[in-house]
Amino acid sequence: MVDQLAYSEENAERIAAVDNLFSTTGQVLARPGRVLVGEGRLLKLCRRRPQAKMFFLFNDILVYGSIVVEGRWCERQKVVPLENVVLEDMEDGPELKNRWLIRTPRKSFCVSAASAEEKVAWIEHIEDCRQRRMERTGEVPTAPLAAAWIPDKASAICMRCCSKFSMRHRRHHCRQCGFVVCATCSRSRYVLRHISQKPVRVCQLCHQMLQDNAQNRGRGGSDGKEWSDDDELDRPDFTIGLLSEALNPQVLSVSLGKSFC
């Protein structure tokens, strides 16, 4: 059904409407063979608070952006190839219900749907389109996935040195492990190529382990080349409860093959 819609006038009009939402601030989404499968408003858990975002699922990409004027204007467009998307189910939290984790090489984050039915629909649609995409192209994702950031309010202390945060002692995030850390514990910078070509903030523990990993592979010191998801970081015992409460992903098993159009 998706293939039949690829060159339909209705599909072209729907994609043009999404292009208009982002105006000149985003890349043009219309291209031969691309189908807009669905769209909707989801809450995205940001570092300080959940924010409403518009999500657009195509047969080859997932697009999302900030809502400026409901139904008329969006900005900060983000485009993720579906082969680079991994979903993990999550239990309901005290603030966000019907949530799940979207993991990508550049950024990983939690989103929440308005109902359990909507959550299931989104997950099934994304998984189905991703599976079809990978079967059609033969592409296999190779980039490591970014760590999801622990929300600011999940920890009142640095998750490395245990110092208490204040107006002057501010929170920061390690781009490798996602922990909430202080400036002293995150002075180091490292090139994580799946996130940025420029050095990004990492905590001291991650920096040391990244360097050790690179040296073990014979690639020198702080060039930041390749970090395996299988390489585990030591996490202090006091963070385990915080991680469980803030993220606590449970890997989702979804049956595929269903047509959604």
Image (cartoon, rainbow, N blue to C red):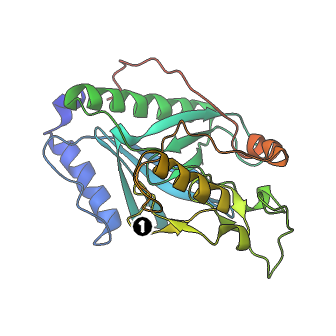
Q: Is residue 112 left or right of residue 75?
A: right
Residue 191 in percent (x, y) is at 45, 63
Quarter of the C terminus within the rendering = top left
Residue 180 in percent (x, y) is at 71, 60
> In this orientation, which residue lies closer to the viewer: 141 or 120?
141
Amino acid type of disc 1? Arg
Residue beneath label 1, please?
76
Quarter of the N terminus within the rendering = top left
Q: Residue 138 occupies which quadrant of the picture?
A: top left
Q: Is residue 8 left or right of residue 186?
A: left
Q: Is residue 218 left or right of residue 181?
A: left
Residue 80 in percent (x, y) is at 36, 49
Q: Residue at x 24, y 55 (%)?
A: 29
Residue 173 in percent (x, y) is at 64, 63
**Residue 82 in view (yes/no):** yes
**Residue 69 in view (yes/no):** no
> In this orientation, which residue lies closer to the viewer: 50 or 148?
148
Q: Residue 113 occupies which quadrant of the picture?
A: top right
> In this orientation, which residue lies closer to the viewer: 184 or 125?
184
Total labels drawn? 1
Determine the residue located farthest toward the bottom in the rendered image: 168
Q: Residue at x 79, y 42 (%)?
A: 240
Binning the other alpha carbons within 10 Å of mark 1 as few (below 14), some (14 to 19) or many (20 upward) gives few
